[in-house]
Amino acid sequence: MGGEPVPESESRRWRAFAVCLMAGFMTLLDVSVVNVALPSVQAGLRTSPAQLSWVVAGYTLAFGLVLVPAGRLGDGLGRRRVFLLGLAAFTVVSAVCGLSVSGGWLVGARLGQGAAGGLLTPQIVGLMQQLFQGRERGTAAGFYGAMVAAATAVGPLIGGLLIQLAGSADGWRWVFFVNLPLGAVTFVLGVRLLPRDRGRERGTRLDLVGVVLLGAGITAVILPLIRAEGAQRSVPWSPVGLGVVLLACFVAWERHYGRGHGSPLVDLRLLHHRPYAIGSVIGVVYFAGYTGLVFVLSLYFQQGLGYSALAAGAAGAPFSIGSSVSAALGGRATYRFGRSLVVAGTLTVVLALVTVGLLIRLYDGTPMWAVLAGPLLIAGAGSGLVIGPNLTLALQDVPPVQGGTAAGVLQTGQRLGSAFGLAVVASSFLGALAASHRDFSLAAGRGVFTSAAFVGVALAAAVADVLGSAYRRRRTPPRRPGGDRSGRSRPIRR
């Protein structure tokens, strides 16, 4: 079966996971790098505002649509196969992006690049589930969270540097071409190091009706949110209602299909695992605040303070640096502290973001990047204790054979949360900017407070889970020593 674990030596397992992190780094880099390169794209291709918006939105939409089917394919056909296919496609389409001669060409290529990234990404978490168990899995998730933070940190710096070296007319092309050597090296290492698949799962067939219902529902929900991110004055919100109906139909169909065929696109019994359900909620809400914060700081530094793209990336780097360091350390502590670690992380982020918002609103000295560096570093340190540990806790009871599907569902929820958070935070920021006659300090402060509110909801969910777990432990007799009959180790403390 494609998702069954294959025994590997310890050193080979970690080298294989390093290949996974390299590939994940590429897909995330192409979000943060392209955001910085948009003015260069507009100057080089003379794109319309709508095309420029879709250079970003198309990648996000295609990425989100493919995640869940890709996870199911990896679980059934073999994660190594699907990983290498997605990586090869992502590398080739990156070259197509760099060779674009028109805005329409680039938009189409970005849709393909997003689909390839969505095909690749669930395999990373699925392989992590397959390669590691217990404390090692927590450590691996910590490195995964550090990779997310590192890609976010260096993306604006790399993008700004490439554009500065190659010029505004063609610098954007190198933002995509940088994936070619990285993708080629990662592919070769993946062929050599990734665990071989055991073959196709018997009876595996893709739930096409489920794919259509889920894809249509996500599209209907996310498109108005994407338009709202662009601060378009007339945003038709009726598709969101249609999307909710389609997603409800998807849930009903999956229940029916599971009873009749046994292999639905998403096994809804995953949501019966409390850690997975709570982790999914925390992930959705936290990414809503996390993504909104990046948006606000980018506009504040560049438009409000007049920083260049490179300087703005450097000014926001303390958050990502703090997150990278704490994620690597926090992964090892997940097994010991459980959900309490997520509580500590979200609480730290909330307090630090409130401080950032107050400093932006009240402090009028210079240089502002130095004033915000400390609080942003602390906020990043808290963030590193959220993403990786929450992933570990959410997947702790999920069988490895379902790791890709479970990861796809989690990451789809995070994408929806990111889109919703961006829409709300962008509306808060841009609305305050218009009402205050372009007072960037007022608008940025309000945007940061809105991001903090989302993280506060994630904090409430984590606290509720810790308190609920403590209550259940008091009312449940202790288990016999030695674990359960399956031989699994004790669950991570929550």
Image (cartoon, grey):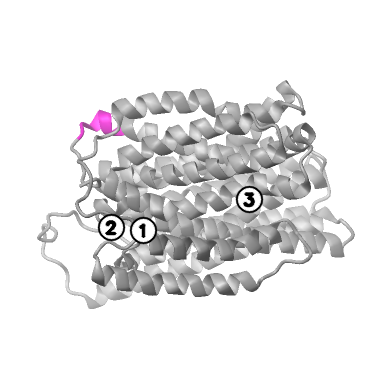
Residue at numbered disc 1: 394
The tag on residue 57 is 3
Give the class, few, some or many, for how many residues have Cα within 10 Å of label 3's Cα (few <14, many ≥20): many
Task: Using the image, determine if residue 447 lies above or below residue 155.
Answer: below
Name the secondary structure under disc 2.
loop
The Cα atoms of the two marked residues, 3 and 1, are separated by 28 Å
Q: Residue at x 77, y 66 (%)?
A: 234
- In the image, 332 versus 302, the foreground residue is 302
Q: Amino acid at mark 2?
A: Val
Rendered location of residue 27, percent (x, y): 51, 39
Task: Using the image, determine if residue 356 lies above or below residue 112.
Answer: below
Residue at numbered disc 2: 398
**Residue 254, located in which quarter of the rendered image?**
bottom left
Give the class, few, some or many, for how many residues have Cα within 10 Å of label 1's Cα (few <14, many ≥20): many
In reply to whether residue 133 is colored magenta, the answer given is no
Rendered location of residue 465, percent (x, y): 39, 69
Q: Nearer the viewer, mark 3 or mark 2?
A: 3
Side of 11 relative to 207 (left or right): left
Give the class, few, some or many, for how many residues have Cα within 10 Å of label 2's Cα (few <14, many ≥20): some
Start-end of magenta stretch: 8-14
The tag on residue 316 is none
Q: Quadrant of the C terminus?
A: bottom left
- In the image, 380 versus 250, the foreground residue is 250
> Which of the marked residues, 3 or 2, is nearer the chain's N terminus?
3
Residue 344 visible in the picture: no
Q: Residue furthest bottom?
A: 475
In reply to whether residue 13 is colored magenta, the answer given is yes
CB within 8 Å, label 2 to label 1: yes
**Residue 443, located in which quarter of the rendered image?**
bottom right
